[in-house]
Amino acid sequence: MSLGTVFLVLTLIWAAIYALSYVLKSSRTHSLLPSTATARHTQRRIWTESTTTVVLKGLHLRVHTTAWNLSHDLLSTSLASSQKARLRRVLKQFYDLGPVVSLMGMLIALGFLATAGSTSVMSLAHKVWVSASDPSTAPPEAPNILTKRSIDPFRGTQSHRSDSFIKPIIPGVTVPLSHLPVILAAVFLGQIVHELGHAIAAAIESLPILSVGASFTLFFPSAFVTLSTAALDSLIPRARARVVTAGPFHNLLLWCILVAVGYTHVGNIFWSIMYRDVSVLGRVVVSVDTQSPLRRYLPSGSVITALDDTLLGSQNASYDGWFSYLNQDRHDQSLGWCAALPENSNSCCSGSGTPGLSCFVSLKSPSIRGCLDPVSILSHFNSAKRCAADTECLTTQQCIKPHASEQLLRITVQGTSLENPDVILWRGPAEEVWEEVQVGILSPRIPLLPVSLPYSMEIFWEYLLMASLSLFFFNLLPLPYLDGSQFLDTILEASLQDPRRINSDEYELEAVEERRRPRRNVWWKEVLRWLIPELTIGLLAVCTLVGTLNIYWH
């Protein structure tokens, strides 16, 4: 997937949104109801019903609804009843864990930012110092840091390396651009779980919700639950902390569940119903880069059984011959081929090669060099006799093999029917095959099933793990509009709360009437409320800027 493709898809999406907006607006032009003049210039409300409103402004689409408010109120009423008093007490004790783990998460997140910032600064300073003392190590004007496959979903191997302490997930830079939809889907699902936590905790505290909804800005989706600020501020610190930290707490719970399910290998049992394990034969071709010349020769679902003379099939589940062979420095052939080297034909071995010919060298000593067409010798299965010495060949032939400088790689492939093996000849660095060809070990039992489905789901699973843990830590940073800012206010207020009222579950009636919670004029509390977010913003800016420079400065 290229940037042009992403731009085209986004253009089509927003064109469809605005086309739908125009149709909906046209269907309401004859309405007898008056319109709001001010709203016409600031935003386009393209759909308004008794429960749902859709607002479109620029490249921002927002949908919010009150359809779920009644269900949430019924849940709150049910939990507040005397019959559910025990359940409510248990739920409160469970969500009391939220402030505890969230406090630790906030401290860990701030410590991580401080450590990452200092480490990244020192790393960048070292690179600048080395570049200043040795100009040859200066970064190139157009660094090539794009990776075709930085996350291997089958072995968990990362091909992209960075000296930065932070390794951000940037589609098209640190991970393939084709992963962008998967990343957005994982983050959006993590946000839904996050907002669900706030809604459940609010129901436990009999706190009503105003609306729920989702938005789509440029290309980034998000979910939200709107709570009454006055009602939330009226809660005592302990109850408010439960509601504020329930979102990050749910993200952490989701991460723990995903990790536990991963360790049980339930996914392997599920996929074994629809797919068979062919690791004893080799590796299944899942996909090939669209720009790779191998794309036409390696169809999806075919099985690669060998690279040169190295068999990829194994009973050992931990053995990954595909990775180890393609990423090693030397690829020596144990056996040669019986062929006749033409006399006085070694120009390709001295650098002035003839197109279509490759340099071959005999196995005997002293070696003899000559130029031959590698396709006729190497590419057809069993087309030439394999040998270890000249004595195994005809008198007019020698036992030869390609010169190491030719970078020839034989890829033995079986079709989707697991029959009729063929040999594909690749000329070039073996690492490029590793980057351009994605392989796995599962082959569909039914031809209609896509071979990429298990691996796409595994990629999504990995990103959902990262998104869940990232949302937990990121939302606990004491930054404006994040849960961490409200949690910090709650901690500061709890530090000044009457100890006899900390564990009380009563409302502050005065705060409800005035729609605000009474504040005590304590100078150090106000200083911390201003200082901690400002320091966090500074640390986040340093980590982002310096971390990006470290990625580009090799």
Image (tube, grey):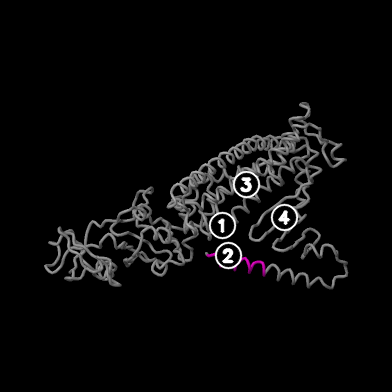
The disc placed on residue 182 is 1
User: Is 305 left, or right, of 22 in this rendering?
Assistant: left
Q: Are there few (<14), some (14-19), or many (20+) residues within 10 Å of tag 4?
A: some
Q: Find the distance from the CA under tag 1 to the CA under tag 3.
A: 26 Å
Q: Which residues are magenta?
A: 2-15
Q: Nearer the viewer's eye, disc 4 or disc 3?
A: 3
Q: Tell me the kind of residue under disc 3.
A: Ala
* 14 drawn magenta: yes
The front one of 178 and 164 is: 164
Q: Earlier in the sequence, mark 1 or mark 3?
A: 1
Q: Secondary structure at mark 4?
A: strand
Q: Nearer the viewer's eye, disc 2 or disc 4?
A: 2
State the residue at coordinates (66%, 47%).
194
- Give residue 323's position: percent from left, percent from top: 38, 53
Q: Earlier in the sequence, mark 4 or mark 3?
A: 4
User: Is 508 left, or right, of 212 in this rendering?
Assistant: right
Q: Secondary structure at mark 3?
A: helix
Q: Tell me the kind of residue under disc 1.
A: Val
Q: Secondary structure at mark 2?
A: helix
Q: Label 4: which residue? A: 213
Q: Nearer the viewer's eye, disc 2 or disc 1?
A: 2
Q: Tell me the kind of residue under disc 2.
A: Val
Q: Find the distance from the CA under tag 2 to the CA under tag 4.
A: 26 Å
Q: Label 2: which residue? A: 6
